[in-house]
Amino acid sequence: MSMEPIDWEQAEDSFLAPSLAAGDATGWFDKLYTAGAEGRVTMPWSRTEPHPLLVQWAQRTGQTGAGRTAVVIGCALGADAEFVAGLGFTTTAFDVSPTAIQLARERHPRTAVRYVTVDLLHVPAAWQRAFDLVVEIITLQALPPELHPRAASAVRELVAGSGTLLVIGALPDESAVSPPWALTRAEIEGLASGGLDTVAIETMAMPGNPAEPRWRAEYRRR
């Protein structure tokens, strides 16, 4: 008799804690995705629709990507990357988990997106200031707070001249159990450095779920 998979959010800490204890802040992601692929837990970060706040922003700002490049950080199974590519951007999407990248390719067999396994903390030098649009959704805050400055710097350095960075993340909740380690207002405001200027920092509810407030912040390189 087969057992029902455990909800991945309930199982998350059992993967995270040993990884952090071993001094590995990112290795647990692939272990969790592997458990999802094997049916031991429900598939993590597996939504099939793009993030609604990304869609809202793209529609409001009239995003068109013809002749422009984009990168989606921590792409999971590709819903956001496919949406960005659908806007016309030549799109790269990466995740630290090889299993997530394999699953993204399988889910989107005819994709125009370039899916690659890359660690945000060790991005290729050729990607430095290479993308006209950089999309970061719940990836910085999936890392321990002591890594936020280094990861934020890596995110900023992906943005090309006159390019845009879009960040979406959860607001701090003192009652929540980490992860995610939500970004503070100081961290959100601090992304406007290294040649990036703030276009807008908004706090808003998730569509259909007013109990889940989110940051949505936009920055542009000079």
Image: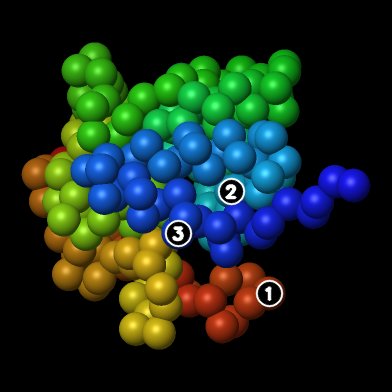
Q: Earlier in the sequence, mark 2 or mark 3?
A: 3
State if disc 3 and disc 2 touch (CB < 8 Å): no
The reply to whether residue 31 is visible in this rendering is: yes
Q: Amino acid at mark 3?
A: Asp
Percent x, y for residue 112? 61, 18
> Which of these two is toward me, 7 or 174?
7
User: How far is disc 3 from disc 1 in space, using C-alphas?
Assistant: 27 Å
Question: Where does label 3 land, which residue?
Answer: 13
Tell me the residue at 38%/67% (across/down): 178
Q: Secondary structure at mark 1?
A: loop
Question: Where does label 2 land, which residue?
Answer: 45
Q: Earlier in the sequence, mark 3 or mark 1?
A: 3
Q: Residues within 10 Å of mark 3 (few under 14, many from 20)?
A: some
User: How far is disc 1 from disc 2 in space, using C-alphas?
Assistant: 18 Å
In this rendering, would 161 be left or right of 34? left
- In front: mark 3 or mark 1? 3
Question: Where does label 1 land, which residue?
Answer: 208
Q: Amino acid at mark 2?
A: Trp
> Which of these two is toward me, 31 or 155?
31
Q: Farthest front residue?
A: 1
Tell me the residue at 72%/16% (across/down): 110
Q: Residues within 10 Å of mark 2 (few under 14, many from 20)?
A: some
The reply to whether residue 166 is visible in this rendering is: no
In this rendering, would 101 be left or right of 6? left
